[in-house]
Amino acid sequence: MDEYEAASVRPNDMPLPVQNYVMIEREEPPSYLKEHTIRSWLLTTDHKRIGLLYLFSIIVFFAIAATAAAIMRLNLLTPRGDLVQAETYNKLFTTHGVLMVWFFLIPSIPSVLGNFVLPLMLGARDLAFPKLNLLSWYIFILGGAIALYALLVGGVDTGWTFYTPYSSTYSNSHVALMAAGVFINGFSSILTGLNFIVTTHKLRAPGMTWMRLRLFVWSMYATSLILVLATPVLAMTLTLMALERIWHVGVFDPALGGDPLLFQHLFWFYSHPAVYIMILPGMGVVSELVCAFSKKRVFGYMFVAFASLAIALLGFLVWGHHMFVSSQSVFAGMIFSFLSFAVAVPSAIKIFNWTATLYRGSISLDTPMLYAIGFIGLFTVGGMTGLFLATLGVDVHFHDTYFVIAHFHYIMVGGMVMAFMGGLHFWWPKISGRLYPEFLGKMTAIVTFIGFNLTFFPQFILGYLGMPRRYHAYPEQFQVYNDLSTAGASILGLGYLLPLCYLIWSCRYGKRAANNPWGVKGFEWETTSPPPVHNFEQPPVQTEEVYNYPPPGNEAVAD
Amino acid sequence: MSRVLLAEIQFFPDQASKMAVRVDTLLIWLILLTGFVTFAIAVVVIYFLAKYRKRAAADRSPPKTENLAVEVTWSVIPFVIFLGMFGWGAKIYFKESIDPKNAMEVHVIGKQWMWKLEHLQGKREINELHVPLGQTVKLMMTSQDVIHSFFMPAFRIKQDVLPGRYTTEWFKATKLGSYRIFCAQYCGTNHALMTGQVIVMTPTDFAAWLKTGRETVSVAQRGEQLFHSFGCSGCHAAQAAVRAPLLEGIYGSQVPLADGRIVHADERYLRDCILIPNTQIVAGFEPVMPSFQGRISEDDLFAIITYLMSIGSSPPEANIPNR
């Protein structure tokens, strides 16, 4: 407990600045949503409001990137690719990749849900550096604006991977501008990661030991480590690429004396850990959802928590599995293959532990739980096919085909986006103070699951048949699967449009939410819905183990 | 042949080599194993969801929430299975990486957006590769511009083709027919059009096909002519005024360098010596050779190296069938 005494300047020890105001107005402190001026949003340092700022921004980026995907899928309805020209198609998949990876997936759970619930879960009033948190958002918007500008003036056609020497020498599109957008965005990631790490170390409520942290906090902590350690490498790599492009400094292009493979090593040294930035937060949300809707402590708390750290650390050692056919040495290929299997073990542990948590629980299948179950199913398929790709002899065939596309969409969309939707529904009563329509929510979760599988399962077969990725046109024998995929995408699109509509609807017309509508454990459910500006009227104290649900059948926690 | 062009529902790609069979066998095991585990997880999850749903009567006496033995079991068993997958996959990968014996060599140059191929007999092709049935074919590949990747799904092999270096892949067709070639590494605007066909013929048909078209000299002969026209022989010849290493027997030998290293003189070494000569000076010689970077095309470079190989210690004549 010495940490609490030592940190005498923590915000929790300061007097509540809104206290007087509260007493004059009424019993309850005003919600964080009370102020309505634009200024109150743009200059806020409240982590909850910043979380919402991120939510609005990533919805915009998601919409643009999803539209790009929709046009691509329509183009692939016919083998000749009749809808758009090859050049346009290449710009579309680059737009889709860059925006989805850096401006949607990476900030999705950490910057939206993490920002909103991490301090609440810890019993803190805000993140450790609230102003830095606002700065992160402005940097994110600046990076995003530059990326959008690059799209408006003509776009980029390198793919999100920016492979050299195509990107540094041959491409005639706005590569440097787009790279600048991604580069700047990286600082937003680093600052958010730093903020989360310091907050987790310094602002935990009294009594909240490390072994009493929520699993979502553990996953945010692991994610933040990667954000802080890996993102600088991306910045350096993009800088080198831009130097070669603008001033012809020979780094990657053999014609200038460089080595094109060096770029791939550097890029994947960041981008493979980045894949875990895009899935660890999802795992954290699912851990929360499985406990909450089984009304039970997670099975094997320590293993689930440390699996996150193991994934974060091992994730730094597997980048070469993106390069099995790149002409890296056979020996290197074998080491990277072995390590890739090793990193699969902690993921498997998580799946087994979630399953075991259900045992003898008291399970309710509300919308967030449906998304969590969907996550477990789709992530399992994504993980299993990841094993195929880690298997050297098989990857030689699958590499750069639609099999890879299907695999990572099972992880990124089937995993992370399902988890994001689940988390968003779960915390929506806390965020908005309103309930969303439950029946519609459940239907949407099911529609998303069906649409997703119809979109991406055929792509596994396409990949096995040999259809390469990033093809604007393709041989006729692949058409059936491409058409199935496009049909699925239209259903999936509906699955994303519906929540947008009914969540907005619920802000005004939804039933008012109780403080703890799910009847679950956790500090965020002990404060009001929506919470007051500084989260808690009285700083909470953790007096029991985490997820300490009473034995089922004796539902004492229901409000 | 026409089957490939027909639009029909296909579940398996053509399987036209032993390597394809090897890869598919492993793949089928992977599918069965992971499919079984996925199915088992799904069954258990659904069973729990049904049995322990909120209003259902069930035994809910609190189970243990920590169990080291269980955790270790479900960590170690997958790990052991993973080791098996790793070993099997690595074995195939290793086999693919070994330089085949008695292979027919074909040179491949990738450029935006076509494949240029040349048989050692001098016959050239664009986006088509004719090969005889049952003959191991080794592709020696390089790119003139960006990174490409030579992918033949029917043989389950793929290898990136890089500018500034040689990469190889090999296959041995076991079935007549024509199979697709794709560029698998995104290479710019018309990436999707950088495709072609491998045409597997009987050895007699192949020999007849080689004789079609206009007369050609072999790549090695063309290389010898270039060796003179680029002025290489002005120094690298016994009677030359400038003292430079003689190149007879150089290919495949161990070359001592001025900086003390000993290198194996393979295609890559010869290529580097021509383009960036001062990085690998042979022991006992002056660094006087000019660089040919930017002055020689990739196919001429291939020809000169092939010539040097033909006068090397392991002459490639034996590797050219039907000559």
Image (cartoon, rainbow, N blue to C red):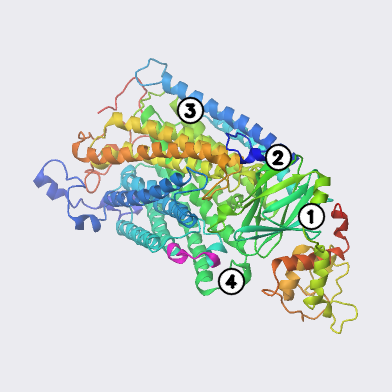
Instruction: Give the residue type that dot 4 points to.
Output: Gly
Q: What's the magenta region? A: A169-178
* Badge 3 element: helix
Tell me which residue sits at (53%, 40%) in the image. A479
Residue that numbered label 1 is attached to: B212
**Residue A426 lies in magenta, yes or no?**
no
Task: Please give the chain letter of the residue carrying mark 1.
Answer: B
Give the amino acid at mark 2: Ala
Determine whether the residue tagged by mark 4 lies in a helix, strand or loop: loop
CA separation in Å, label 4 and label 1: 45 Å
Give the letter of the chain under mark 3. Answer: A
Nearest-to-viewer mark from 4 and 3 = 4
| Residue that label 4 marks | A250
Q: Residue at x 21, y 52 (%)?
A: A15
Q: Of label 1 and label 2, which has the lower sequence position?
A: 2
**Disc 2: which chain?**
B
Task: Give the percent coordinates (x, y) of residue B80.
Answer: 65, 35
Image: A238 above or below A467: below
Query: Which residue carries the number 3 mark?
Result: A356
- Same chain letter for marks 4 and 1: no
- Quarter-of-image position of residue A134: bottom left
Q: Which residue is mark 2?
A: B20
Q: CA distance from mark 1 to mark 2?
A: 31 Å
Frontmost of labels 3 and 1 is 1
